[in-house]
Image: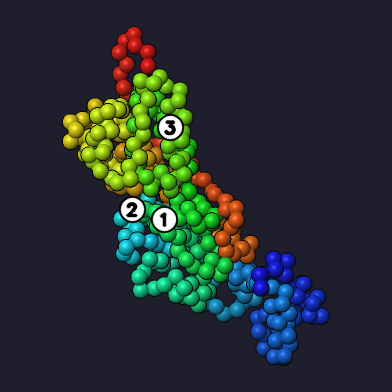
């Protein structure tokens, strides 16, 4: 039976012919009521599709002075990869988790990591563990590449996504605003005098972001003279030879991408950064180094995901969403030594 969102203590009390306080005691299994009364009321609640809100239940227990070990609930944070700690190599993923954990503590929760790709544990077993622990709030963390979505019984949980994982998993999502991030990149590079902007992405990065980095640059290119346009490079495989061919053909004045390895590739082509070619990092928090580019605010994204998960718990929502919402967190431009002001020869108009 699908849960009836309108079912509450009052509707159960009306159907059972008793008071709201009696219903509350029966659902708690209070010893002051006869067993047959508890059974009858619980059957009525089941027939009406009632589902208790775990947060409200916990708060009411605290208010009644019940002796519980902790006033905190637990939120699950699903991590992915070939090993349990693989995600920690990606500093943006670490930022997501740290921001989520800090916000969870602020709201009175703990955040516990679960390795969803563990080959020794099936999705059904993971779901059993979460249910046995009383964990209903689930944050689906990011994953490398384009993997298949985890196959939990989502009807048992109040899940949200963080970052851009699993396009085929319709869940509320907290994510950096990639479109506006690229607009900031374009505006800053124009102000510095750069004209020929070359975007380099891997195909899975473009797919996962729904082309929201590519789209504003493509629109910008439409307003340039044909000779100033640079076709973006979107690679199925990350290969230096493909980059070298693209660079020699298009000669961008600045390369925009997600991996600082591009600086090494430029060096092997005989170009210095930023003296000959600029470099802009679209996610400068994801690897060590000082680069000009976008700080996607991963800690703020993580905190926003926890807010969304807790809101779903408070609303007693479960399952996937037919029209999932996105909460966009604004990234910021950060100056760095990989770009410079480009001199324009006197009398020449850019």
Q: CA distance from mark 1 to mark 2?
A: 10 Å
Q: Position of residue 220 (x, y in %)?
A: 45, 28
Q: Secondary structure at mark 2?
A: loop
Question: SS of the residue at dot 3?
Answer: helix
Q: Residue at x 65, y 76 (%)?
A: 64
Residue that numbered label 1 is attached to: 142
Name which quarter of the figure residue 283 lies in.
top left
Closest to the observer, 37 or 238: 238
Q: Which mark is residue 90?
A: 2
Can you tell which mark lies on residue 287?
none
Q: Earlier in the sequence, mark 1 or mark 2?
A: 2
Q: CA distance from mark 3 to mark 1?
A: 25 Å
Q: Nearer the viewer, residue 73 or 346?
A: 346
Q: Which residue is mark 3?
A: 217
User: Marks 1 and 2: CB-CB under 8 Å?
Assistant: yes
At x 37%, y 50%, the residue is 92
Instruction: Give the residue drawn at x 45%, y 55%.
Output: 166
Pointer 1 local density, CA inside 10 Å: few below 14, some 14–19, many at least 20: many
Please identify the quarter of the rendering in which residue 257 is found: top left
């Amino acid at each position: 039976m699908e849960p009836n969102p309108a079912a509450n203590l009052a509707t159960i009390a009306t159907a059972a012919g008793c008071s709201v306080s009696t219903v509350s005691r029966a659902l708690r299994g209070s010893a002051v009521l006869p067993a047959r009364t508890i059974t009858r009321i619980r059957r009525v609640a089941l027939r009406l599709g009632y589902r208790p809100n775990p947060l409200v239940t916990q708060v009411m227990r605290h208010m009644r002075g019940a002796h519980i070990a902790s006033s905190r609930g637990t939120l699950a944070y699903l991590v992915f990869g070939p090993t349990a700690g693989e995600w920690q190599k990606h500093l943006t993923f670490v930022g997501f988790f740290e921001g989520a954990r800090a916000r969870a503590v602020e709201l009175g929760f703990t955040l516990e990591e679960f390795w969803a790709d563990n080959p020794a544990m099936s999705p059904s077993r993971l779901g059993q563990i979460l249910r046995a622990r009383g964990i209903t709030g689930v944050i689906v963390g990011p994953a490398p590449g384009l993997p298949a979505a985890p196959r939990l019984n989502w009807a048992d949980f109040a899940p949200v996504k963080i970052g851009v994982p699993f396009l085929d998993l319709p869940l509320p999502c907290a994510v950096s605003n990639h479109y506006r991030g690229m607009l900031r990149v374009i505006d800053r590079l124009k102000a510095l005098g750069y004209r020929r902007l070359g975007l380099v992405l891997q195909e899975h990065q473009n797919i996962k972001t729904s082309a929201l980095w590519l789209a504003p640059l493509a629109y910008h290119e439409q307003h340039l003279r044909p000779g100033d346009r640079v076709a973006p490079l979107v690679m199925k495989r990350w290969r230096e030879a493909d980059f070298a061919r693209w660079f020699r053909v298009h000669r961008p004045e600045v390369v925009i991408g997600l991996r600082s390895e591009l600086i090494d590739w430029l060096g092997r082509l005989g170009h210095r950064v930023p003296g000959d070619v600029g470099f802009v990092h679209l996610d400068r928090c994801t690897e060590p180094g000082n680069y000009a580019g976008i700080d996607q605010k991963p800690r703020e994204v993580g905190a926003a995901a926890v807010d969304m998960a807790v809101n779903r718990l408070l609303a007693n929502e479960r399952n996937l969403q037919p029209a999932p919402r996105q909460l966009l967190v604004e990234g910021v431009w950060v100056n760095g030594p990989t770009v410079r002001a480009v001199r324009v020869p006197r009398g020449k108009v850019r």
